[in-house]
Amino acid sequence: MISRNTRDLMSVAFGGLFARKVRTILLLMGPVIGVAAIVAAVGLTDSAKGDLKAKVAQLGTNLIEAKAASSFGSQNPTLPIDAVRRAEQVKTVEKVASVVQLTDIIVSPYPQAKAKYETTPIPVVATDTRLPYVLEVPLTSGRWINASDNENAVRAVVIGSGLANELGYLPGESRTIDLADKPYGVIGVLGKVELDPSLDNAAFISFASADADFIKEDVLPTKLYVRSTAGTEQVTSDALRTAISLGGPKEVATEIKAEALQLAAQSDRQLQLIVASMGLLAIIVGGIGIANVMSISVMQRSTEIGIRRALGHTRRTIAQQFLLEAMVVGFIGGILGVLLGAFAILVGVWLSGWVFVLQTWIPPAGVVLAIVVSIIAGLYPARRAAKLEPLETLRLG
Amino acid sequence: MTEVFSESIPESQAPFLQLTDVSRVYGEEVKVFAMRNVSLSIMPGDFMAIVGPSGSGKSTMLGLLGCLDLPTSGSIKIAGEEITTLDDPSRTRLRGRTIGFVFQQFHLIAHLSALGNVETALLYRGLKPAERREKAMDALERVGLGPRHDHRPVQLSGGEQQRVAIARSLVTDPIIVLADEPTGALDSTNAENVMQIFESLRSSERAVVLVTHDQGVAGRADRKVSMRDGEIVADEYKVLS
Ligand SMILES: Nc1ncnc2c1ncn2[C@@H]1O[C@H](COP(=O)(O)OP(=O)(O)OP(=O)(O)O)[C@@H](O)[C@H]1O
Ligand SMILES: [Mg+2]
């Protein structure tokens, strides 16, 4: 609970501000314009990248790709056979899926089209049952390759969303496509993989089918998709390289899939800084304005101050009265500035079709900044007011 | 009118305000004695006028009595408390508790209503707003301005403004009401009205001090202190026959 004296002080400060409306509006101008400029600067530059930011947030930044780096002497580099198990040893790894990129398999929707697809080959990827779960991409229709498909080496294929489009595949349609002349039944369509668009055109089959139909030697993974604990992608990515190669001859390269997207989503810091510093300049000039207007006000109100002193108000109380007026100006000006700034962002977003972004810490920070600047500006006039001698201001007869 | 000397003041009563050997000197090299070795006691129930020609030290006296100024030497006691050794905040609070001011120029706060002006004297005293308002209303009613309580100073005549100022000086229940040329800015009708209010303030719980060079005003007082060149040259009591 606030003390009665504090409440008295507030009623005096608010009363003084309310009674001199024009002067109060003048005082408010600085913090309002300054805070509005800062809020708008940060908000608009953030909003310009708002859709990308939302995308990064939605896709997650923790998808890591680990693939065999081409080392001397091998044209199709592979990872060790137990790469998944090795990757799972890394504590920050949450889930892993492995794939084998197959080469020299001509995929054709029907035998007559083979010539065309020879020139623009469709990548074939053998993979485990966990891939959509690790990519966090659902199927748009049908189902994914399951354990039973894998055990029985069923000739089942899941196609990427781009490929489904190209082939004019309808959801639920029963369709067979040829993989190196072997008929595979399409069982599902994988959704769009934003973080790895190369998968959108691929055809996915089980390891067992790959082993049975296409690969003579051991089926060795060429690539892992890994989800790490959020925020640990860099350390996980570094740890994976050693964990998978274990000092062996097979070198591993890793890539954080969202890195490029994150980079693109970053606001133009330089522009933000320039406009925000202009806002800061505005608020400082506003602060000087407050100091100025309040000093004049102290002169004009010197008789009032003298009377208050004669009536028993202490110097401290007089100083607090002016400081509180400054603080209230900062508070109201800050709130109005945030509202004005937010409105400017809305207009900008509306004009450019961006996504409205205003980080939650900005409005309170703007108000606090306005209050701090106003209080600092009020210090000098408050001191002057407190120093006035009642005897000199009252002009006794 | 009979002249009575200060020795005749009843010894049993303690003075509200006591000046002992007070001097107030202005200037460093050329010293101006605005007041020189003045001793004066203001007693409960006093209705006193301080008179003197221009430059005699009336305003200086008012500043010292009102605890707005400090003497160069000597002692000033208000309600037995030595004020010359008090620090500024304590002196300010003592002033607020014990002294009410009425000024020639009224000195009301322009943006506040009559009630707001009277309430200003009651701020920072731990009062609830309702209590403060009630006390201020009572004071305004005492000077006959209850119905005008929400009027701003500009909406009031000079006489009414001075009555608001009197209400403001009374609302804290001071032991001394100090009025500086209170009728100086008023026409004769309003001046008469204000003087009647001052006369009605006579009480054994209070002393009223009017600083004036208007002999008519001074003539209404029970006690007249005359100053010249910073010294008290006469201290007379009027005895009603
Ligand atoms: N601040 C000051 N600095 C220097 N001298 C001063 C100051 N204030 C008063 N004096 C001098 O002290 C003397 C008494 O002044 P004071 O104002 O008390 O007289 P007064 O009786 O109020 O006169 P008036 O009726 O003209 O108002 C005068 O000689 C005056 O010049
Ligand atoms: Mg004078």
Image: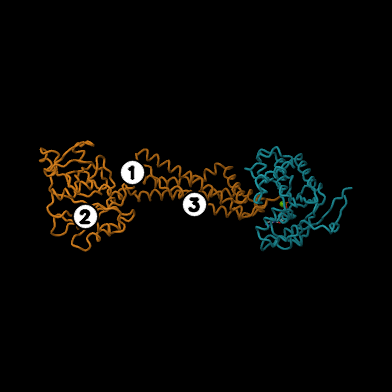
Q: Amino acid at mark 2?
A: Lys
Label 3, residues with CA under 10 Å away: few <14, some 14-19, many ≥20: many
Would you say the beta carbon of the disc 1 residue lies within 8 angstroms of ligand 1? no
Chain of the residue that carries numbered disc 1 in the rendered image: A
Quadrant location of ligand 1?
A: bottom right
Q: Amino acid at mark 1?
A: Asp
Asked if marks 1 and 3 fall on the same chain, the answer is yes
Front-lying residue, A155 or B180: A155
Residues under numbered marks 1 and 2 in contact, where contact means CB atoms less than 8 Å apart: no
The mark nearer the N terminus, 3 or 2, is 2
Q: Amino acid at mark 3?
A: Val
The mark nearer the N terminus, 1 or 3, is 1
Residue A238 in the image: x percent, y percent? 27, 59
Task: Give the color of chain A as drawn.
Answer: orange
Image mark for residue A51:
1
Residue depicted at 48% across the width and 50% down the height: A368
Image mark for residue A373:
3
In this figure, which residue is indicated by the disc labeled 2? Answer: A67
Residue A174 in the image: x percent, y percent? 19, 37
Image mark for residue A207:
none
Asked if marks 3 and 2 fall on the same chain, the answer is yes
Chain in cyan (letter): B
Residues under numbered marks 3 and 2 in contact, where contact means CB atoms less than 8 Å apart: no
Chain of the residue that carries numbered disc 2 in the rendered image: A
Residue A295 in the image: x percent, y percent? 56, 50
Give the Cα distance between marks 3 and 2: 55 Å
The mark nearer the N terminus, 1 or 2, is 1
Give the Cα distance between marks 1 and 2: 30 Å
Label 1, residues with CA under 10 Å away: few <14, some 14-19, many ≥20: some
User: For numbered disc 2, what is the local secondary structure?
Assistant: strand
Give the Cα distance between marks 1 and 3: 34 Å
